[in-house]
Amino acid sequence: MTQTQTSAATPTRPWAPTLKDRALTVTSILLAVILDVLIVAVTPLKGKIPYFFLFFILWFIVDSIFVYRAKGQKGVRDGLAAKVTLFGAVVVVMVVASILWETIHRGLKGINLEFFTGTLRNTSLFDPLGSGGIAHAIVGTLMLIAIAIIFAVPMGILTALYLTEIKGKAAGLIQFLVQAMSGVPSVVAGLFIYAAIILNTPLRSSAFLGGLALTILMVPTVTRTSQEVLNLVPRDLREAGLAMGATQWKTVALVVVPAARSGLITATILGVARIAGETAPLLFTVGVFDSYNFNPIKGDQGSLPTVVWRGLQGGTPESIQWAWSTILALLIVVLIMFVIARAFGTRQMKRK
Amino acid sequence: MSENITKNENGTIMSDQDKTTTPSSLSDVAGARAAGGSRVGTRALGTGLEARGVHAWFDKHHALADVSLDFSAGTVTALIGPSGCGKSTFIRTLNRMHEFIPKTSMAGQVLLDGKDIYESGIDVTKIRLQIGMVFQKPNPFPSMTIGENVLSGIKLAQLKVSNQSELMEECLTRAGLWNEVKDRLGAHAGGLSGGQQQRLCIARALAVNPKVLLMDEPCSALDPGSTLRIEETISELSKTMTIVIVTHNMQQAARVSDYTAFFLSDGGPGQMIEVGPTNEIFSRPKDTRTENYVTGRFG
Amino acid sequence: MPPMSVDAPEKAIPQARKITTKPRVSDQIFRGVVTAFSFSALVILSLISIFLLIQGFNTFKEQGFGFITGFEWVTFVDENGVETATFGLQAMLVGTLVISMIAVLIAVPLSVFTALFLTFYAPEGLKKYLVTVIDLMAAFPSILYGLWGFFVLMPMAEYWAQLINKWFGWIYIFDVPQPIFSRSPFIAGLVLTVMIIPIITSVSREVFSQTPLDRIQAAYALGATKWGMIRAVVLPFGAGGVVGGSMLGLGRAFGETVAVFSVLNIVFRSNFQILFTQGGNVASMIIQKWGEATPKEVGALMAAGLVLFFLTLIVNFLANQVVSRTVKSGR
């Protein structure tokens, strides 16, 4: 029998969309766009949003006509599902894009060097931007963050260590409590510090109290992320440490924690990002202040979120401009932390 | 018995040795099956399934090379061979399940009733209605009742069925499960044993009336009792459809199949070494590699 | 010689030995310290409850059940410095529910669609980018949502509200006593929607991506389209997770403060006509009244904080139960 030729074949993907399929998709989109523009021109709809909704509706209708002939009702439903899920994702992206764009667009107008170096000592939020700035608020926010880190990071990481290393009998309870704590509204955290400390001790509004309120909000985030990170440390590392005769605490301190180091830093940064923009607790515990106050335990502080808050409440075009520019500064800080947290997070992954 | 036997010999031409020493009881079993009576096709089965020069890649890795097999209508073909030689990959190219894994590609043709199922413009979901599949691990839908599971294929394909309960009973009977579940069709599928679940999956596959049934090691996760029952089912089913079964168990291949194809990978892509009537593969294999495998020297 | 027993001696199965080790002092200290810090969560939560209760106690005593069910919030100080007050939270509790429900009703479909898109439709590169976008959303400060909600969303939302009122005004909730559509529960609900989408999407996505592959393959092998497969396998599997995620979102919406305050006109009336400029939310009310609160009012606000605290605690507890039960059981 003659040997059938062994075809040295080239890989193909017959299921991939063909040129014809793509042409069909493009055609249906174009048709939808054209009909969209026509219909909006003829009817009394206005604004950008109707274009958007109408486009999806029209696209579905046009596409269904093509699909129905090839695949029947089943295919039409499948096509609808694909478009609806795409619609959802597009809406979400558009919202985020809008937030970013508007913040940059509106906030940038008020930004200049003075904005970052001056304070509100001689300027009020009702004055136009150009003189004065938020340097004091930046300092205040940094102090708040520092104090929150000092309290929240040890609490969070140690709690996570309890849950992953010691796994005692109370672990279930502690896990539940951490989850419960993550649901505490920011207002309640502020009220609590006020009720517990300001009403009962001689301490008054200060960065220290604000930091304490923020700690309550930060601990759950740090704990949860640290838990995830510590659980990623392979068990053999711990076993190696113990097998060498090290005590548990030495194993944890010298083997486990360093192995999870970048992840724990990520946990901290994520916690900071969570609280950096919190406004409500500060209103009860930190007050407002218009120039530098380097004393963390005494006296009101300026902070970025309260500047935004006051600007918004002020209601005049100038104060609102202050609000936008300050929130832009805050957003940049949060974004930077976000990026850094990601970078640390992926470094943790790569080491595995 | 039809005569379409395609051989792919890869350059090694074996002399027709007369193997008088029958290596094992496998050949006896296979021979018994071959002699066991005529099998009469009871309805038009089409012309069967044929693979021509099928290759498969996972990303850049060439997993399967140049497999050509002709599955005649109404026959049972077993695919045997050691792990990792491409049997499962091949069977998944037959109902276009291979393409679900990201970055895969293929070459060649698979013809159902003479038409290539990979042709552009074809509705792949219709292909899968005609070529059904039963998997290694029984996978009934746990959120549905037993009855709903059987009819799930009908519902997914939005087919019109004049009498649903009749169809349910027929499929469950053919799968050998009717008597055990007829009083609890409304119960959840998760409560069945492994063997029962697998028979439910068979019933589910039958409900859409496929021409071909592909079975990827359907009994490897089951106990011997369930295995035997399913093998009986396969014999019954082969009267009305074409069956291709991947199996690690050579005794099973000998028991249930008319034809057997031997797959092997020598470090490169998997290839089909030899195919033939089952009793011949086990008693007088033409390729040494086949012989080594069926006599247990490796694998 | 003592008689030897003829039978082979029975081998007794020994009892398991108790494994002990002398704990090292350093380890005991370690365990002690770590355990103590972990109980800080318990301590904090208890302290919150205690202190708010102490401050709010008088209010609960004086107002009784009326604190929850009453509608008025008035306080009057006469010339002698005697303060009489009536504090009732019902309007604010109703308002909180109304805007949170609006948020959940809109956010859940959008989040589920997005999660499905991410898990089953998006190509790899796009997926990573989209996940980043969603995580970013979760990181935005709430006051940013307040600003954006007021200046960007509200003008558009007012227009939509007018349309809805025009076409569906015959339904009670879409009717308005006067055509004022700014700072309404509807708009507050929309802002909350955007704020809770990230959490519902994340939880849904996690559940969807854990759908067992063999069931997915079973559906496809039966000739299902992608949507058929999602309906038959993914949605039944993920339903519990979606519900849990939605409840987490609900809990977040309950406690939201500054974002709601910026886009809602707080009035002490239960208002179900969501397009109209009248609404409430316990958290924002606390902020609103705080600045000029009389002594009794401070106590009342503390009491309100306690009520809010327990409300969110319950919702979050239930939500976490639902999520962990479905994600872990894999049913």
Image (spheres, helix red, strand yellow):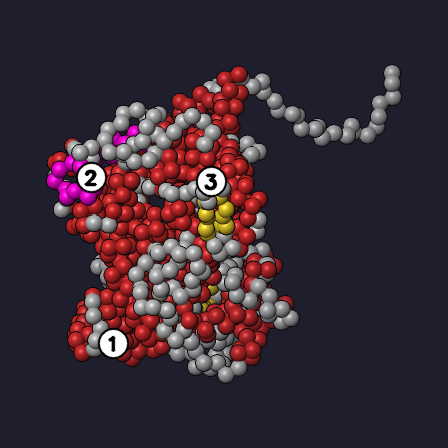
Chain of residue at mark 1: A
Q: How many numbered discs?
A: 3
* Label 3: element kind: loop
Q: From this viewpoint, which residue is outermost toward the bottom? A: B162
For the N terminus of chain B, the image quarter is bottom left
Distance (Cα) linking label 1 and label 2: 58 Å
| Residue depicted at x 47% and y 40% | C81
Instruction: Please tell me whether mark 1 or mark 2 is closer to you in this view.
Output: 2
Q: Both on one chain, marks 1 and 3?
A: no
Which residue does the numbered mark 1 point to in the structure image? A62
A140 inside magenta stretch: yes
Determine the chain carrying the residue at label 2. A
Image position of B198 (left or right of C285): right
Q: Give the CA distance from mark 1 to mark 3.
A: 73 Å
- For mark 2, what is the residue? A124
Residue type at the position of mark 1: Val
